[in-house]
Amino acid sequence: MTTSSLKTHQPTTKQDYRHVVMIVAGLLFVVSAISSLVIHDWRNVTIAMILVVLVFAPLLAERWVNLIVPTSLQIQYALLLLTGPYLGGYWRRYEIWQPWDTVVHFYSGFFASFALLLALAKTLHTFRLSLPVWLEIVMLITAKATIALTWESGEFLFDLTFDTRTQGGNHDTMTDMMAGLFPAFLIAAALYAHRRYGTFRYLDSLKLAGQSKIS
């Protein structure tokens, strides 16, 4: 094999490992589902199986949209699944310590904002668009607000279905929505500083990922 062919093959080899974190998380959820099935804990079986399905989201996003989801973003997503539905729902951290829900919402705001910037970069690249930074910021915050609303609606349905207490009333719901939205404003400020001063270079990696394709 020639040197040039080795150089061509190496990036593909490295890309093959970017889903490892999701595979590990998926195995954890499968084991949890089996453990709950053995003791006939149907509530936790359902939660674990939902998590097994959610693990495939990065892979499906790559195939449907033809982009490379960065390993860093997949790690953030795995942490969200672990801290939210798994620790919060499966292991009942939401019920044991009520602020856990708010903490998860706050963390999710960062992951969701970065994921939205990746989606925005892919859209702009695909349709060869160039938007002013203020419009990108508006789109980011609007999309994140929609996600926060959808998440709270999901928790409401989750409580109704499984008789849990992930929501603690209107005060809790609004606190969680603001906790989830606040990081979007921080990322929006970082995006503005990046466009103007070249800081927060991680945003460059998301932009490049949005322009990449599965080979």
Image (cartoon, rainbow, N blue to C red):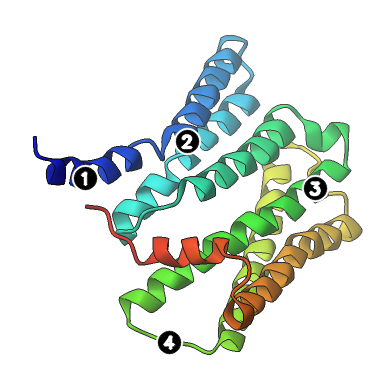
- Above or below: residue 140 compared with residue 61: below
**Nearer-N-terminus badge (2/4):** 2
The one nearer the camera, 79 or 34, is 79
Residue occupied by mark 4? 130
Give the labeled residue for mark 3: 103
| Rendered position, 40 above or below 90 | above
Q: Position of residue 48 (x, y in %)?
A: 56, 29
The disc, 3 or 1, on the residue closer to the chain's N-terminal end is 1
**Mark 1: which secondary structure?**
helix
Which of the two discs, 3 and 4, sits closer to the camera? 4
- Horizontal side, residue 214 vs residue 179: left or right: left
Q: Residues within 10 Å of mark 3 (few under 14, many from 20)?
A: some
Q: Is residue 59 left or right of residue 47?
A: left
- Percent across and percent down for residue 64 are 31, 57
Q: Nearer the viewer, mark 1 or mark 4?
A: 1
Q: Name which residue lies at 65% across and 33% down.
A: 86
Mark 3–mark 1 distance (CA, rounded to whole Å): 43 Å
The amino acid pointed to by label 1 is Lys
**121 and 163: which is toward the camera:** 121
Closer to viewer: mark 3 or mark 1:
1
At a point 29% along the width and 45% down the height, the residue shown is: 11
Label 4 amino acid? Ser
Q: Is residue 212 above or below residue 32?
A: below
Q: Which residue is mark 1?
A: 7
Is the Cβ of the residue at disc 1 closer than 8 Å to that at disc 4? no
Neighbor class of circle 1 (other Cα within 10 Å; few <14, some 14-19, many 20+) is few
The disc at residue 22 is: 2
Please tell me whether residue 6 is drawn above or below residue 45 in the rendered image: below
Q: CA distance from mark 3 to mark 4?
A: 35 Å
